[in-house]
Amino acid sequence: MYAPPRAPEFNDAVYALVRSVPAGRVTTYGRVAQQLPTPPHSNPDAQRRLGARWVGSALHACPPDVPWHRVINAQGRISFGPGAVQQRALLSAEGVQFTEAGTVNLQQFGWPAAAASPQLL
């Protein structure tokens, strides 16, 4: 199951949180999921196991005012897909730097700062 119970409410919470990520910063799908309350009619274990996928699913269909490009995977990489080239260009335009291996340094560009710690991702 890639959608949480009551997906519209969960998606709205994802969008609100992602809108607060400042330009030039990134966060991860898992970190977004950790910051949200457990959806009604779900359980914390389901959110722990599936939350990052739920966030990805929400961002796949987000409104145009949501800076979806600021959410990357826990390895500091852009997830593969049709928007990957655009996502990298948008992040680069905001000053986010990529290593030669194509990763973002989460210690430097992670948001919030606590999210930069690998054990919290």
Image (cartoon, grey):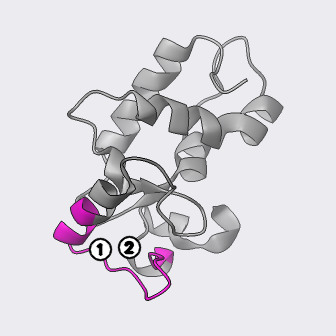
Residue 8 colored magenta? no
Lower sequence index among marks 1 and 2: 1
Q: Nearer the viewer, residue 82 or 56?
A: 82
CB-based contact (under 8 Å), mark 1 and mark 2: yes
Residue range of the region highlighted in magenta in the rendering: 89-106
Percent across and percent down for residue 67 are: 28, 45
Disc 2 residue type (three-letter): Phe
Left of 29 or right of it: where is 59? left
Instruction: Examine the image and state in which quarter residue 73 appears.
Output: bottom right
Instruction: Examine the image and state in which quarter residue 97 appears.
Output: bottom left
Q: Which residue is mark 1?
A: 96
Label 1 to label 2: alpha-carbon separation:
7 Å
In the rendered image, is residue 93 in sight? yes
Label 1: which secondary element = loop
Q: Which residue is mark 2?
A: 109
Magenta span: chief secondary structure: loop
In the image, what residue occupies the spot 75% across and 40% down?
48
Most extreme residue toward the left, as rendered? 93
Percent across and percent down for residue 63 are: 27, 27
Disc 1 residue type (three-letter): Val
Q: Nearer the viewer, residue 15 or 63?
A: 63
19 to 113, vertically: above or below:
above
Percent across and percent down for residue 99 are: 43, 86
Instruction: Examine the image and state in which quarter residue 51 appears.
Output: top right
Percent across and percent down for residue 22 are: 26, 57
In this rendering, the label closer to the viewer, 1 or 2: 1
